[in-house]
Amino acid sequence: MRDMKLLLVDDSERMRTVIRTICSSSFDDVVECSDGTEAVNAYNESPPDWVIMDIKMKEMDGIEATEKILSSNPDARVIIVSQYNDETTIDAAIKAGAVGFVSKENLSKVIDLIKG
């Protein structure tokens, strides 16, 4: 089986640690970014198998970053994670092209989406 690579994007180092711990058994390589601009550059430099993307970040938010990644990489698989799980936020994530949305209160569901 080939190595699986994850691009993990969140402006909170603590949250990246939590998500990395949850996902560690599914990925051989985890690249971390703290904002959307870094994420777009990291994706284009070395495309991962999956992206886990926060929404609210300083430089470029996760919705815009997801749109940019998918505009040049239509097969990208992005899961949006956010503490904001209202209908408007979820709709924006799906409209941006995310394959799924997971509330930060339910992070274990990220693995369910990845494993299909």
Image (cartoon, rainbow, N blue to C red):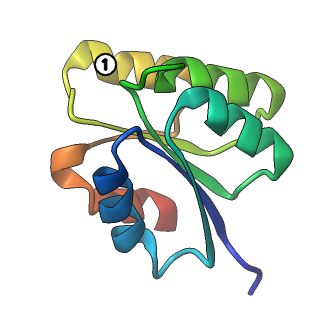
Task: Sort mark 1 into few (<14), some (14-19) or many (20+) by Cα contacts within 10 Å.
Answer: some
77 relative to 98 in the view: left or right: right
Check disc 1 and give the amino acid type.
Thr
14 relative to 78 in the view: left or right: left
**Residue 33 image point, x, y percent:** 55, 45
Q: Identify the residue at image location x=49%, y=61%.
A: 114
In front: 81, or 34? 34
Q: Which residue is mark 1?
A: 89
Q: Is residue 18 above or below residue 32?
A: below
Question: Is residue 116 visible from the viewing direction of this image?
Answer: no
Question: Is residue 108 visible from the viewing direction of this image?
Answer: yes
Instruction: Pick out the residue farthest to the left.
Output: 105
Instruction: Pick out the residue farthest to the top.
Output: 88
**Residue 11 image point, x, y percent:** 40, 38
Quadrant in the picture for residue 58: top left
**Residue 115 image point, x, y percent:** 49, 68
Element on which disc 1 rests: helix
Location of the N terminus by quadrant is: bottom right
Quadrant in the picture for residue 41: top right
Q: Is residue 108 above or below residue 11?
A: below
Q: Is residue 23 above or below residue 96?
A: below
Q: Identify the residue at image location x=77%, y=33%.
A: 74
Q: How many marks?
A: 1
**Residue 91 image point, x, y percent:** 37, 18
In front: 112, or 66? 66
Q: Identify the residue at image location x=21%, y=27%.
A: 84
Q: Identify the residue at image location x=41%, y=26%.
A: 57
